[in-house]
Image: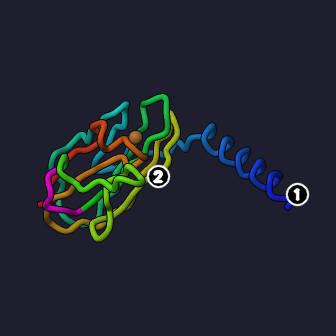
């Protein structure tokens, strides 16, 4: 039992180090870039061509955000929210994600998109409800 608090402390330190070293991916050759701010998800395009694409994600905010890409016909502001976790439900709709992107972080996700309606959200607890959602289409 004595070992448990030490293990928890170590995990905390590793987590903190991961937050401070936000990734800086090269996103100059991406087909689309999504900016994350407090509390907005802003893609630079409203439509994207079907097929393989590289999507860049930049966190311009002072706190950790993330982006989850969902393929759904539900409107961006009408997703179901789980009351316990305060997160939007992703089951059956999640296509790709960049999770826990620290302040100033830049990342990219490789996707292979089929035509349809998509919603981009930040699903850190409470952020979806604060407005971190945006719709886009693949044609
Ligand atoms: Cu967020």
Which residue is tagged 2?
A: 99
Q: Nearer the viewer, residue 1 or 65?
A: 1
Q: Nearer the viewer, residue 107 or 5?
A: 5
User: Element under label 2?
Assistant: strand
Q: Which residues are magenta?
A: 71-75
Q: Residue 28: which quarter of the image?
A: top left
Q: Residue at x 27, y 66 (%)?
A: 93
* 33 on left or right of 59: left
Residue 90: image location, x then y, percent: 32, 62
Residue 104: image location, x then y, percent: 49, 33
Which residue is tagged 1?
A: 2
Residue 133: image location, x then y, percent: 26, 44
Q: Residue at x 29, y 41 (%)?
A: 129
Which of the labelled discs sits on residue 16, or is there none? none
User: Element under label 1?
Assistant: loop
User: What kind of secondary structure does the magenta stretch mostly adopt?
Assistant: loop
Query: Which image quadrant: the C terminus?
Result: bottom left
Point out the residue furthest to the bottom here.
92
Q: Residue at x 34, y 49 (%)?
A: 30
Asked if the stretch drawn in magenta spans residue 139, the answer is: no
Looking at marks 2 and 1 on the same chain, the residue that comes earlier in the sequence is marked by 1
Q: Residue 91: which quarter of the image?
A: bottom left
């Amino acid at each position: 039992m004595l070992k448990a608090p030490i293990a928890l402390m170590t995990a905390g330190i590793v987590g903190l180090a991961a937050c401070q070293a936000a990734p800086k991916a090269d996103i100059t050759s991406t087909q689309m870039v999504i900016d994350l701010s407090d509390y907005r998800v802003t893609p630079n395009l409203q439509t994207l061509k079907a097929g393989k694409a590289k999507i860049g994600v930049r966190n311009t905010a002072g706190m950790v955000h993330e982006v989850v890409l969902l393929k759904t016909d539900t409107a961006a502001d009408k997703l179901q929210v789980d009351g316990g976790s305060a997160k939007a439900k992703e089951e059956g709709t999640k296509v790709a994600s960049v999770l826990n992107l620290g302040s100033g972080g830049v990342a990219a996700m490789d996707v292979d998109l089929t035509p349809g309606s998509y919603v981009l959200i930040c699903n850190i607890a409470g952020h979806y409800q604060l407005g971190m959602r945006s719709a886009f289409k693949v044609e």
